[in-house]
Amino acid sequence: MKPERKISTGNLARVMYILAVGMVIILTGFLLCTDNVIRYQARQSDGYQILTDLEDSQYEDESAPIGIVQDHSFIYEGDGDTLAFYTVHQYVEVWMEDTLIYSLKPGDGTCIETIGSNWNVLSLTDQDHGKRITIRIMPVYRSFISRQVDFLLGDGMEIYADRLMMDMPQIVLSIAAIIIGVLFIATGIYMNMRQDQEQNVLYLGMFSLMLGIWRICDTRFTPFVSQDRTVLMFYFSVLMLMVGTYPIIQIGRKNSSEPLKIIMDVYCIISSLTAIIQIGLQLARIVDIRESLMITHVLIAMTAVIMVINYIQRWKNNRKGSFVPSLLIVGIVGDVILFYVRHTSSGLICTLSALIIFLITEGIFSTIRHFEKEKKIAMQERELMEGRISTMMSQIRPHFVYNTLGSIEQLCEIDSKKAQQLVHDFSCYLRGYFSELDQTALIPLSKEISHTEYYASIEKVRFPDIDIVFAVQSDDFLLPALTIQPLVENAIRHGLMKRKQGGTVIVTTWQDEQAWYVRVKDDGVGFDVDQLLDEHEHIGIRNIRERLSLLCHAMVNIESEIGKGTEVTVIIPFDGGRNESNRS
């Protein structure tokens, strides 16, 4: 029967984040499958010049999104020209005298109010000479009423190339962040496939990829590339902000203090739940994500605060690379402030530059720490191997071999069948020992119990007044080789053999909601537990304790009372490394 496990804040944070990402996918799919913009254009562009001199007016109109309409008109006096202007969260109509020649508005069936950022481009010919052109702009949000729109007449390729050159630093840095993100994600997946449990590199990749997508979708040049999917690009950039806080919080979480880990988990739960609610309200056409964007910015600010606290702790612990995130934090906070001042997030050169520095530096330190950890683990495993061999060879003591062979010799004369059985058990016992010389992986409990039973049968021949009882209630887990048998041997040698008459050793296994348990209990003479750690003859117990701690995060509790016996309990948690996959 599979034991129930309590849901930790970390697991709940992961579940909420997965749900938030799922909502992002749903909204993205909806925007992909619907017509976000209906663009009507009666003229095709074949050349551009420069436009100046506009007559501006503003008036109320209930049919407009917020009841405000802004008209910009001029008498066209040129020939072979093209009109181009950039709008953000604004509907557009262009009238030639009383004829509508261009409009931009949301598509039918969409769940959005805004149409994002757009370049509006239309051709003007010789036939339009002397006619009044009125550009009607209708802001979707009140914060964009005062937004200035520049109207251009010029060569189309010049406008295209000029915009490309202005946004080139952002585009290059964004592409660099995306490439770094993909490489880090691939590296993180590879590390986890090797069961290295290295999460930082994976989270760095996710963060880099999301930030790169956010920026490249938010440049003024981007609407030139896909004019029919500008709404998708706008929302995709915002969605990357909404779900990008989780991976940046998870970076370095492993090295944080326990109270801060709980704060991080709770924050991730709140941010993911907020994203789910925001996207849900958007899909239900109740509240537009753009209208609740301040909530996302507040969460970003909270992310910056948590990052500062986290890296201050790392700095206090003398961890490398702690100074780097300060550049990123300053850049992000500064650009958020500029967003509300200028009503645009274009630019962010400082943030993107700091991001590249942060990612590269943190990635290098994470990789260095990972290889240092691998080297340390390899050294520990080698030491454990040497300790295991030393312990095994020291436990196969000459007197044990001699006594066993002597027992076999005696039984050959008085009971050949028992002698044959003892030879079989002794050979299986030795085979089990020597087969574990090169064994570094955990083994099933059943194999360890079988090996212990061979040892018990040998000792029973030599000491008939000793009973060894196995009460196995749970056996579907792994543990290091040579864990139970040495404990049983200690119970016999140091507990029962010092009594005038024999006694009993009971080996019990069971599990509860959090761990598996192995208990070796005897009714021998007992001892003073405080002296155990100071005696060199108990190096076997220390070796068992160290191997259990390293290989499966297990604990060993020893209780003893002089004259009443000893009880040794091994506690192997469900999340003890490789044991997790074997829990039923």
Image (cartoon, rainbow, N blue to C red):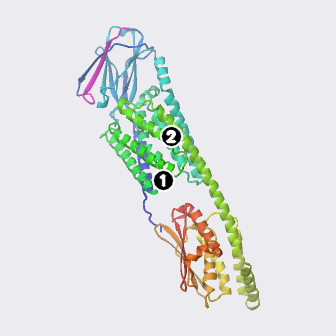
Q: Locate residue 421, reporting x and y percent.
A: 70, 83
190 vs 28, nearest the viewer: 190
Residue type for callout 1:
Ser
312 vs 447, nearest the viewer: 312
Which element carries disc 2, helix, strand or loop? helix
In the image, residue 226 sits, relative to residue 556, either above or below, namely above
Q: Which residue is mark 1?
A: 256
Q: Locate residue 36, reporting x and y percent.
A: 38, 32
Q: In this figure, what is the number of numbered marks?
A: 2
Q: Are marks 2 and 1 in contact (CB under 8 Å)?
A: no
Q: Locate residue 485, reporting x and y percent.
A: 63, 75
Q: Locate residue 412, reporting x and y percent.
A: 76, 88
Q: Which residue is mark 2?
A: 208
Of the two numbered discs 2 and 1 on the same chain, state the one appearing first in sequence.
Answer: 2
**Stretch of the chain drawn in magenta:** 62-78
**Horizontal side, residue 10 vs residue 455: left or right:** left
Residue type for callout 2:
Ser
Q: Is residue 480 magenta?
A: no
Q: Is residue 69 magenta?
A: yes
Residue at 57% across / 41% down in the picture? 183
Measured Cα–Cα span from mark 2 to mark 1: 21 Å
**Which labelled disc corresponds to residue 420?**
none
